[in-house]
Image (cartoon, coloured by chain):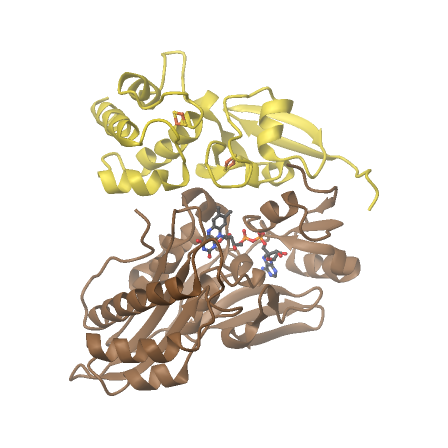
Chain colours: A brown, B yellow
């Protein structure tokens, strides 16, 4: 399978890449890991005259932990993030990074590319909702920041304007007694998840939930959140009953597409199971337990 | 867009040998290896990023060569299945796959070997689960995977001893 012909450019600085993208306009596209773009171009989906390879731009792949914040460069690959000290410290980061596709795709695919696709089935954008992340963007008009909740505006659509690139993702480090989990259900490693659930919790000294943030992935055109579900968990001990009640509130807000991965009803029942698993693992991690957990497919 | 696009000069090191070629930007890396360099050990299975038959190493990391353009490999170091055997003979993984029936038709084998090699470089004594996770991106239609897992264990044991 061959894509239609295109011109290839590999600028050596972020500024040069932005200038080139601005000059060439909407028929030019950046390519990072290419793990979404190459398959799409091979299927001849989307018209592209020029590819701007940003994959080797210096300084954009770093993963930093500062005093109270984590910062992941847009070019950090899923594999590097999964093996990073940040994933060691926040295991839900490893759930997400290490559960994406297979090793080969994780070696190439980047976090910046993942959120920029706006694909409703990808994992990073929904997962980052649980950590209230912010996206750093650079473009012809300078720098700006957008909350992850506002970044993906519709299926395959983000707020990025012509010439703008994602440069990093930032989020506050969770306070003590916090824990999170992100679990997707996949039919096979190289398949996108049928659906996925992310939950981030903070407990008080008595083990009562003081803050919660839940998200569902792949079951609507954008990640699904529910203030009602978050509020329902606060003040509880996050028992099975509490999780079932909160789960119903957020699952009611989902609109799962009926497709090869299953019917809407099937996906709703998978969500119920995943919500319970993710919530239980998040609570266990908040109490300091070490829990392995990620997409289930073997 | 005109059908004519200027070729790009690239330099790639494959299995220790450096090649310079002029390529069309849309040339896939797997086609470059097979058609331009004649290294047909790397297979095209699905051509849709799914099966892993085209797995090679780029700078030590396993990647799907059907999901990369050759221009993206400019200046990089690649290893393909042809780079496994040495003058001393087959790589322990190749020997183990042959001795433990880790292949039948052999279509998936180059990719399986390259994924397994990446694992053993990092982890000389992997568990069943670690092997399964490692080859989760490699599809085999023949063996049922059990003998592949056995072969990887056998190769790991031989490599630990030597
Ligand atoms: C077989 C297979 C299975 C997969 N399974 C999963 C899965 O289970 N879960 C999951 O989440 N993903 C999955 N993916 C997708 C994978 O995670 C991709 O790596 C990711 O979606 C895109 O990252 P990339 O760096 O490869 O982006 P590219 O393919 O290079 O680019 C994707 C899009 O983003 C744009 N872009 C890239 N970087 C930037 C940037 N910094 N700023 C602005 N725009 C940018 C590009 O122009 C393009 O439109 C799978 C992919 C494959 C091939
Ligand atoms: S041929 Fe590359 S993944 Fe199947
Ligand atoms: S040996 Fe035939 S596909 Fe694996």
- Quadrant position of the C terminus of chain B in the picture: top left
Residue at point 49%, 69% (across, down): A220
Q: Quadrant of residue B33?
A: top right
Q: Residue furthest left?
A: A206
Image spot of residue A158 (x, y percent): 60, 68
Where is ligand 3, by quadrant? top left
Residue at point 28%, 29% (across, down): B152
When the figure is inspected, residue A12 is found, relative to residue A87, above or below; the finding is: above
Image spot of residue A5 (x, y percent): 74, 41
Image spot of residue A43 (x, y percent): 64, 45
Residue at point 25%, 42% (across, down): B129
Q: Quadrant of residue A238?
A: bottom left
Q: Is residue B91 visible?
A: yes
Name the one closer to the observer, B66 or A19: B66
When the figure is inspected, residue A240 is found, relative to residue A217, above or below; the finding is: below
When the figure is inspected, residue A196 is found, relative to residue A82, above or below; the finding is: below
């Amino acid at each position: 399978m061959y894509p239609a012909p295109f011109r290839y450019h590999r600028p050596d600085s972020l500024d040069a890449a932005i200038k080139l993208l601005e000059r060439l306009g909407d028929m030019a596209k950046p390519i990072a890991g290419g793990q979404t773009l190459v398959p799409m171009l091979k299927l001849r989906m989307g018209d592209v005259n020029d590819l701007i390879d940003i994959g080797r731009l210096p300084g954009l792949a770093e993963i930093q932990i500062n005093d109270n914040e984590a910062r992941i460069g847009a070019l950090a690959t899923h594999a590097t993030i999964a093996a990073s000290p940040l994933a060691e410290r926040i295991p839900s980061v490893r759930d997400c990074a290490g559960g994406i596709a297979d090793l080969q795709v994780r070696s190439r695919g980047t976090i910046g590319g993942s959120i920029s696709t706006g694909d409703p089935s990808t994992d990073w954008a929904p997962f980052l909702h649980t950590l209230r992340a912010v996206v750093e963007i650079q473009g012809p008009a300078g720098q700006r920041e957008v909350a992850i909740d506002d970044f993906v505006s519709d299926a395959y659509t983000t707020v990025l304007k012509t010439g703008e690139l994602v440069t990093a993702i930032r989020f506050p480090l969770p306070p003590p007694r916090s824990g999170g989990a992100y679990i997707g259900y996949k039919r096979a490693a190289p398949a996108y998840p049928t659906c996925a659930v992310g939950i981030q919790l903070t407990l008080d000294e008595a083990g009562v939930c003081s803050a919660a943030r839940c998200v569902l992935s792949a079951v609507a055109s954008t990640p699904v959140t529910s203030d009602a579900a978050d509020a329902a968990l606060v003040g509880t001990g996050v028992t099975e009953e509490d999780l079932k009640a909160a789960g119903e509130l957020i699952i009611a807000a989902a609109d799962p597409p009926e497709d090869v991965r299953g019917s809407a009803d099937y996906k709703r029942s998978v969500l119920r199971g995943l919500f319970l698993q993710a919530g239980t693992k998040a609570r266990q991690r908040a109490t300091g337990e070490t829990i392995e957990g990620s997409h289930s497919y073997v | 867009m005109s059908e004519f696009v200027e070729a790009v000069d690239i330099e790639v090191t494959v299995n220790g040998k450096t090649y310079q070629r002029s390529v069309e930007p849309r040339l896939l890396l797997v086609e470059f290896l097979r058609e331009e360099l004649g290294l047909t050990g790397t297979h095209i299975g699905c051509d849709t990023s799914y099966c892993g038959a085209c797995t090679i190493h780029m700078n030590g990391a396993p990647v799907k060569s059907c999901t990369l353009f050759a221009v993206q490999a400019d200046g990089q170091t690649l290893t393909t299945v042809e780079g496994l055997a040495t003058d001393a003979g087959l790589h322990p993984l190749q020997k183990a796959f042959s001795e433990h029936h880790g292949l039948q038709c052999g279509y998936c084998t180059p990719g399986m070997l390259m994924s397994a090699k990446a694992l053993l470089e990092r982890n000389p004594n992997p568990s069943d689960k670690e092997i399964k996770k490692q080859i989760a991106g490699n599809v085999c239609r023949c063996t049922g995977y059990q003998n592949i897992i056995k072969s990887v264990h056998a190769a790991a044991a031989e490599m630990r001893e030597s």
